[in-house]
Each structure stands twice: as C-alpha cells, then as structure tokens.
C-alpha cells in the first residue's frame, strides 16, 4: 500500500494549476488597484446584473427659526450594464511532444503563454468597451488633449475630489518622456503611471489608437465577473481557482488519445457605469 503522504502526479498538477491561477489573480488585482475599482460584482446564477445610481436635489440649508426644514428628495434608478459571457479555452499536448521536448517545455511553457494570451483577451475587451464612450474632448497637443479630458471629467462628475484615470498609446507619451522622465509600474501586462502631471493615473497600452486618450473617473469603473468557483459551475465542474474566482483551470490526462489537456475558463468584464462619463480626447487636428 502506498504511503498516504506520497506526492503523486495529480498533486503536482494541482500545484501547476494553483500557480497559473495565482499569477493571473495577482496580476489583475494590481490592475484593479491601479484603476481604483472598488465595486467588484460577481454574477449569480439565474440573475441579471442591475447597477443603481442615486439622483436627487439637495434643498437649501438656510431655514428660519421654527420653520419646517424642507425635504431633499432622492431616488435610485437602474442602470443597465453589458451582459457577460464565460470564455473558454483549451489546449492539449501529445505524449510525443512531451517525450521530444520534455515536460517543462511542452506543457509548462505553453501554459504560461496561454495565460498571457488570456490576459490579452481581457485587456482587449476592456479597451474595446472604452472606445464606445460618448464623451468628447480635443487638444492640439498631447498635454492640451490630456488637460481637456481632465476638464471634461470635472464637468461630467461635478463633485469634489474626482479621481481620474486615462488610457493612451505609449507612442503619444514618448515625446513627453524625452524631456520629463517618470516612474512607471506594471500590472496585468499594462504599464501605468500614478499621479501623472497631478491629473490622475495613466494606463499605457498599444490597444488605444495613437492620437486618442480615453478618460473616466475611477468611481465610474465596475468589475463584473462570473465566479468560476461559484454561479453553480462548481456543482458540475472542478476548476482550480482562488477566493476571487476570476479564472479557473483544470488539467487532465486523456488516455483515449494520450494528450495532456488544459481547460481554462474566465468571465471578466470591466465596465463603466456611465457611458457618457467615458471621454474620448483627440490629439491634434480634427473633430473630437
């Protein structure tokens, strides 16, 4: 009889799965922190996501002695958010590839590359969504366009202490960096700069068209996701995930064709509660 504490191949597979999840979840957690997203909403089975925003009018606070204080009326309104879908990927490595290349190269390296590609999909979905923003601004130069985007946010979010976040192509920032070096950080495959020019956080990525800056308030962003360790998925499927449930992976050997298969699932959508609160600023000539 085998020792009950014996480390088996299935245990090692579990470790690899956990490392995969940890790298993804840790990376996106850094991005969520940089974006200032505080609302992380898990989708529940059989439910439709509805966000609510409060609107109302504050009555004057100057009330005479003995007079009735007027009521300030507020109400909540439902805001429709984009529906989310669970994305699924699978790869399989043959026994021959493992023999030829070795386990590390045939399986581990390809799984790491798969992780990077999944991150790209999540990023692209987010930037595609930002492009649908309806706010507009324009500036003849990079700094002017950035300042105009900041100004629009102050108008759209007429509140004290608006924390702004900007998304731009690295090439648009290159000329500025030549004369003003700045400190950069990375998260989820993205480079970002905190408190850029005192205006807010800047996220750099080539998915943003050159000559365009997307801007919004951090409080306007929402992380909506399908928890792969919940939403009744865990009643049927066994995925390795963490407490967030952002991503799941399952590794299995298929003896019918002698392959090592990895199945990855992820349902993440970063959204803006107010679409008109996403400003698209244009650098240079042309309409905003």
Image: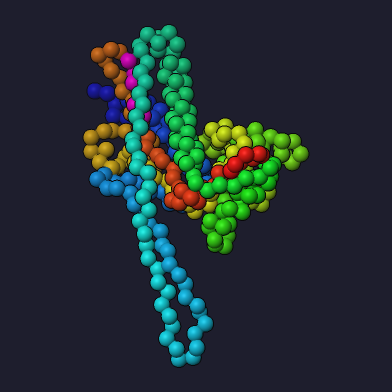
Q: Residue 17 at what x, y percent from top left?
A: 38, 30
210 or 115, nearer to the observer: 210
In the image, residue 148 sits, relative to residue 267, either above or below, namely below
Q: From the image, which quarter does the C terminus lie in?
A: top right
Q: Residue at x 28, y 12 (%)?
A: 257
Q: How is the image coloured?
A: rainbow
> Can see residue 25?
yes
Residue 14 x/y as whole percent: 36, 29
Per the rendered image, the range of residues in magenta is: 259-264
Q: Residue furthest right?
A: 179
Name the quadrant containing residue 249. top left
Q: Residue furthest bottom?
A: 66
How many marks the image carries: the answer is: 0
Q: Which residue is painted at 55% across and 44% down in the image?
A: 280
Most frequent secondary structure within the magenta stretch: strand
The residue under the point 45% across, 51% down is 274
Is residue 211 located in the magenta-colored stretch of the structure?
Answer: no
Which of 110 and 190 lies nearest the eye of the viewer?
190
Which of 89 and 234 lies nearest the eye of the viewer? 89
Residue 83 place in picture, x, y as percent: 34, 42
x and y percentages locating residue 11 in the rendered image: 34, 28
Q: Is residue 93 left or right of residue 209?
A: left
Residue at 47% across, 72% down: 58
Indicate whether 279 appears above or below 160.
above
The quarter of the rendered structure image containing the N terminus is: top left
Is residue 200 visible in this depiction of the protein? no
């Amino acid at each position: 009889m085998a020792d009950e504490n014996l480390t088996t191949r299935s245990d090692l597979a579990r470790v690899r799965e956990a490392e995969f999840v940890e790298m993804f979840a840790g990376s996106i957690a850094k991005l969520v922190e940089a974006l200032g997203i505080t609302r992380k909403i898990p989708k529940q089975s059989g439910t439709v996501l509805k966000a609510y925003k409060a609107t109302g009018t504050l009555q004057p606070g100057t009330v005479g002695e003995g007079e009735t204080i007027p009521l300030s009326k507020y109400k909540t309104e439902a805001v429709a958010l984009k529906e989310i879908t669970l994305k699924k990927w699978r790869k399989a490595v043959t026994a021959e590839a493992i023999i030829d290349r070795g386990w590390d190269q045939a399986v581990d390296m390809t799984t790491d590359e798969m992780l990077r590609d999944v991150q790209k999909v999540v990023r692209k979905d987010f930037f595609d969504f930002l492009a649908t923003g309806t706010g507009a601004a324009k500036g003849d130069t990079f700094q002017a366009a950035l300042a105009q985007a900041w100004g629009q946010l102050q108008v759209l979010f007429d509140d004290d202490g608006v924390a702004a976040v900007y998304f731009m192509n690295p090439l648009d920032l290159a000329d500025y960096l030549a004369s003003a070096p700045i400190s950069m950080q990375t998260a989820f495959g993205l480079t970002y700069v905190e408190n850029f020019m005192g205006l807010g956080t800047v996220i750099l990525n080539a998915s943003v068209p050159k000559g365009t800056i997307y801007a919004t308030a951090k409080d306007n962003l929402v992380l909506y996701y399908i928890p792969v360790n919940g939403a009744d998925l865990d009643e049927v499927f066994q995925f390795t995930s963490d407490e967030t449930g952002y991503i799941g992976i399952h590794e299995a050997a298929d003896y019918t064709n002698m392959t090592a298969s990895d199945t990855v699932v992820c349902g993440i959508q970063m959204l803006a509660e107010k679409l008109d609160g996403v400003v698209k600023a244009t650098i240079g000539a042309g309409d905003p």
